[in-house]
Amino acid sequence: MNESNNKDIRTIETQVPLCVLEMNNEFDLLKEQYEDWPQSVNRVIANNALAEFRNNISCDSLRESTCAVCSGLYSCEYLSTVPVQEICLPLLETNKYFEEPFFEIDFVYGHPCIDKSGYKILFDRNGFVKRNTNDDNENPFDLRLCNNCK
């Protein structure tokens, strides 16, 4: 009870609410406890941690690719390769404003499904996935799409 009386007296003397005094005390204790933090990490521990990370992660899992529709960069797990024939091209038609000559946008992509459709569509060419076959002029590439655009 003596401690409780001391707190009440201190609250009255300082005219500061008790909860504020307690928070100040807690802050002062934590400040003393962590005054020597942060400390530098031991070089051997740091090198071992980096080596373990490097061994457990592949560069492919860190690689990002572009979505052909939104131009967003995503890791491969959030992207899918979709044939152009499966895309509903009218949904992707650009605003007439972007067809103005001063934008200098080339709407010819070299894919018959897109070029012969008559739609002006903006694609990010970095999202094109070339097909391995040399003779396939009907389907020269597929589109890489993120989960949001798919």
Image (cartoon, rainbow, N blue to C red):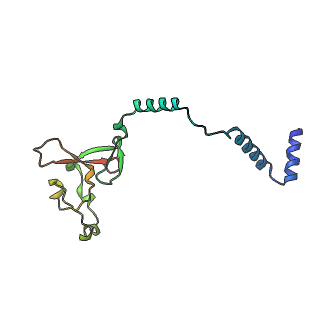
Image quarter for residue 54? top left
**Residue at the (35%, 42%) spot, across then down:** 63
Image quarter for residue 32? top right
Left or right of 54? Residue 111 is left
Picture coordinates of residue 55, whole percent (x, y): 40, 29
Counting the numbered discs, the total is 0
Picture coordinates of residue 3, whole percent (x, y): 86, 39
**Residue at the (30%, 54%) spot, across then down:** 69
Image quarter for residue 60? top left
For the N terminus, the quadrant is top right
Q: Which one is nearer the viewer's eye here, 33 or 4?
A: 33
Q: Residue furthest left?
A: 135
Q: In the figure, 37 relative to 126: above or below?
A: above
**Residue at the (23%, 70%) spot, across then down:** 101
Picture coordinates of residue 48, whole percent (x, y): 48, 29
**Residue at the (72%, 44%) spot, across then down:** 27
Picture coordinates of residue 115, whole percent (x, y): 16, 58
Q: Which one is nearer the viewer's eye here, 62 or 45?
A: 45
